[in-house]
Amino acid sequence: MSGGIFITEERTEGDSEGPLAGRTVAVKDNISTEGVRTTCGSAMLADYVPPYDATVVERLKAAGATIVGKTNMDEFGMGSTTETSAFGPTENPAAEGRVPGGSSGGSAAAVAAGEADLALGTDTGGSVRNPAAFCGVVGIKPTYGLVSRYGLVAYANSLEQIGPFGSTVEEAAELLDVVSGPDERDATTRDEGAETDYAGAADGDVDGLEIGIPTELLEGADEGVVETFWEAIDELESQGASYHEVSLPSIEHAVAAYYVIAMSEASSNLARFDGVRYGPDHDLEGDWNETFAAVREEGFGDEVKRRILLGTYALSAGYHEKYYAKAQDARAWIERDFEDALSEADVLASPTMPTPPFERGESLDDPLQMYLADANTVPINLANLPAISVPAGDTDGLPVGLQFVGPAFGEREIVRAASAVED
């Protein structure tokens, strides 16, 4: 792998005609590609080759795109640094010695390094926006239901969406135009994605735009990140936008609620990897339980095992009401808070990440530190809203991302606001 960006480098040519003809696209390795292995960054699926394409891959090919390979990722999407991959870490092309973010770090790095014009990632709690901010590129997390998840290897299916990366807002929006829209094979998709023109909204016109700024998402952030954020807001104000502060009191519970829900869903979704249907072949002795345990011990990395154990505990008899049910109550509260805040603003804005990119290895021994780094991104997944990360500048030479959040299916608003930051 070049810089650890790709797990599999294999070109797949699309149709000659289409809006992405002549463009190259890198695809995260948890999205199924017919005849090309899809590993999810895990030894458990090191040799798995899907017999079909995900819906988004079918649409890429029909649009004329050339797929250049499958990109590295945190194992099964569990991580914020792309260091938990069984195939080694990815380097950050924009910040030497730093992580590219995760879990879609390979996809963001592919665009930042010029290895692909565009890329697809998946965002369960910020896994598109986090690496976009750390690598200095644009990443979009669509509204839940805008993009088909058919063919995506599930980690936490009530939270995750496939999202695009690009060097510019317009390019990322062009890719979103191609992959969005209803799909009869995914009942969660909605008609709002049909016949869209998100790229056309990247006109940089923010005259009259009202921005809400959640004060809770600035608390505890790195001083240089906050300074860069306010410089970008001041620039938008000079272009005709205005802002006011808003409060999202439920946010303090978001990280805890997110990880209880995500880990619970992971414990269920990953139960299929048992060495019978999926997983490495073994000639083990003992009963089925011993074989099952041995395969999962060998096939999964430490972070995946940690999340499966915690999720299984949260769903177990006697603890379901104490943890999982309360997390769902908190999720409903967060949804109401965002609805109230967006009733008086066109978009909400915050730093995408509260810190600049971590140094390599910095968070591996402290999982809690890694989880808390997602504080500004996971609330949006709990509320099923769209968000975009756009480069806003730097602090001490390290990239800083600005996040805009819109109402459900308000992708045009966040694209318009983000495009003005580029001007």
Image (cartoon, helix red, strand yellow):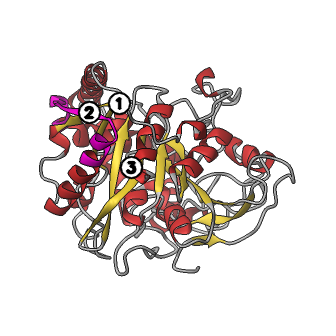
Query: Residue 421 has which mark?
Result: 3
Tell me the kind of residue under disc 3: Val
Residue 120, position as x, y percentages in the image: 58, 53
Distance Cα–Cα, label 3 vs label 2: 14 Å
Q: Look at 27% across and 65% down and name the residue there.
A: 356
Query: Disc 2 designates what residue?
Result: 242
- Disc 1 from disc 3: Cα separation: 13 Å
Residue, disc 1: 209
Tell me: residue 182, above or below residue 56: above
Across and down, in percent, residue 91 comes to 44, 76
Q: Are marks 2 and 1 in contact (CB under 8 Å)?
A: yes
Between residues 20 and 419, which one lies in front from this camera angle? Answer: 419
Secondary structure beneath label 2? strand
Tag 2: amino acid? Ser
Give yes or no for contact between labels 3 and 2 (Cβ–Cβ under 8 Å): no
Residue sitting at 46 percent across and 60 percent down?
Answer: 137
44 in relation to 334, above or below: below
Q: Of 154 and 283, which appears nearest the observer? A: 154
Mark 1 is surrounded, within 10 Å at the Cα level, by few (under 14), some (14 to 19) or many (20 or more) other residues, namely many
Residue at 13% across / 60% down in the picture?
A: 223
Specify whether residue 161 is painted magenta: no
Nearer-the-camera pick, 103 or 356: 356
Residue 67 percent location from the top left of the image: 72, 60
- Magenta region, residue range: 234-252
Asked whether the viewer can see residue 279, the reply is yes
Circle 1 SS class: loop
Say if mark 1 contacts mark 3, CB within 8 Å. no
